[in-house]
Image: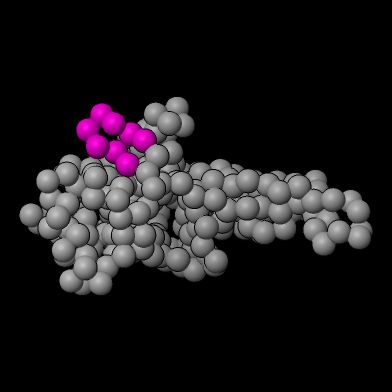
Amino acid sequence: MKKIAIVVMCVLATSLYAQKDAVDANNNVLGALASFGPDGAGVGGSSIVFNPARRIDGTVHVFETWRNTAIIQTTGGMTLRLRDNINLNARRNVFESKIGTDSVFTFDFTNIEKMVVNNKTYKNIFSPVEGGYRLVEVVAETDDFAIYKDYKIDIKEGSPNPMLAQQNDKYLMKDSYYVKKGRSFKKFKLKKSSFLKLAGSKADMLEAYADKNDLNFRDEKDLEKIASYYGSL
């Protein structure tokens, strides 16, 4: 691995350290990541962006801008850092970085264990509900269960009638929550009763903790704190 790391370091023109340190994967060297890692195990590749024939309002991307920083943990134990150039394409269910006006670098999670973007963790998991792997946001995670958020895109059709307000089609961002506990994997409603049922015998302690700290079970940041407290019990 060390010999390969030295080669990659030369290609990236940046610094590569031990497992716990990071590679500064600058935006102008995204192409080198396609062959990064042992045996050329890449973390993605470039592709051309094809615009739809008919204009569609809205966006397929989760974040408002591309100026987001990612910390990438590979399955081989390497850590890479990408600055100010990443977004989550909810329609394709992939992370992307811009490499040109009509091209993007698409991250392949085959060799990625997890990715942290804007302090939120994303993993590629198998969803029995969807019948395949999905790139999801980790809302809360303990030794007993995990709650995931999945983003999808619907299209609301417009009308050619000029008298109507919406003439163009429009992208609609939608999200769903899932809970994994043991072999069970199902849809989850982000509410107090659902989480307390999930907590089992620890429900009363969690409810008291949430009340004392004014935490809302419907708020993702608060739910993460409640789950962290659950893990400490």
Q: Residue furthest left?
A: 233
Give the magenta part as a residue range: 179-186
Is residue 46 in sight in this rendering?
A: no
Relative to 226, is 125 above or below?
A: above
Residue 14 highlighted magenta (yes or no) = no
Horizontally, residue 95 falls left or right of residue 18, namely right
Residue 125 x %, y % = 36, 37
Horizontally, residue 214 falls left or right of residue 47, namely left
Q: Residue furthest bottom?
A: 213
**Residue drawn at the location 46% of the way across and 46% of the way down:** 176
Is residue 125 in sight in this rendering?
A: yes
**Residue drawn at the location 17% of the way across and 51% of the way down:** 203
Relative to 168, is 130 above or below?
A: above
- Colouring chosen for the image of the structure: one colour
**Residue sitting nearer the eye, 139 or 109:** 139
**Residue sitting nearer the eye, 42 or 122:** 122
**Residue drawn at the location 18% of the way across and 71% of the way down:** 212
Residue 90 x %, y % = 54, 49
Residue 4 x %, y % = 29, 44
Image quadrant for the N terminus? top left
Residue 111 x %, y % = 35, 39
**Residue sitting nearer the eye, 224 or 7:** 224
Image quadrant for the C terminus? bottom left
Relative to 39, is 104 above or below?
A: below
**Residue drawn at the location 54% of the way across and 50% of the way down:** 174
Which of the 4 image quadrants contains residue 35? top left
Q: Main secondary structure of the magenta part?
A: strand
